Image (cartoon, grey):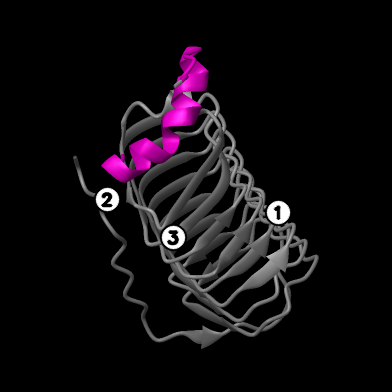
Amino acid sequence: MKAARRPAVRLPPLEPFAGALEPDGDYDGLEFGAVDLTGQDGAGARFLDCALTGCALDGTALPRARLLDTVLTGVRGVGTDLAEATLRDVELVDARLGGTQLHGAVLERVLVRGGKFDCPNLRGARLRDVVFEGCVLVEPDFAGARLERVEFVDCTVKGADFGAVTLSDVDLRRVAALEIARGVDRLAGAVISPAQLLDLAPLLAAELGLRVVD
């Protein structure tokens, strides 16, 4: 079992951000402190060595954006669009996000610590060296995604969709609560605990067409 490599973000001295996001914008060494980015368009933008703290991201459009060596703390929003975005060496701490679009995104060396995520769409995404720690994931959609060296630590996963997912070195043993709505047959490549196996036994039996009777 190969452990996930965590990001090691070391931010330089930052300059305060002023203005509004722009498509294909280039943001380097900036601090977004409690900035309201609601409804702004940053499609294709690049964020390098940035800190976003307490920002509002309701309906913020960031498709194909690149977030590199960046820390997001206490961000919140509904309907944030990060489709086909790249997140590399990123820390996402104590976020509260609903309906975030991450389909087709690439996440590499990403730490998601704390916070709550309602219905995140990760369909077809690629996750490598990603750690979900102490967070709540409600109905996460991983359908068709590829997960490699991904760890779920002390977090709650409710109603997860693993349909057509591909897993490699995915550690589910330390999940506080695990509920799979779809795709239990796609768990090859994951590691679970004996207790989790007992919890999943009815789903596995149903998938195999087994009848369990006294």
Q: Quadrant of residue 153?
A: bottom left
SS at circle 1: loop
Residue 41: percent from left, percent from top: 75, 60
* In-front residue for pair 211/80: 211
Q: CA distance from mark 3 to mark 2?
A: 16 Å
Q: CA distance from mark 1 to mark 2?
A: 26 Å
Magenta residue span:
192-213
Residue labelled with disc 1: 99
* In-front residue for pair 24/96: 96
| Rendered-image quadrant of the C terminus | top left
Residue labelled with disc 3: 155
SS at circle 3: loop
SS at circle 2: loop
Residue under the image location 31 percent in, 75 percent down: 10
Q: What label does residue 18 carry, if any?
A: none
Q: What label does residue 4 carry, if any?
A: 2
Total marks shown come to 3
Height in image: 65 above or below 199?
below
| Residue 165 appears in the figure | no
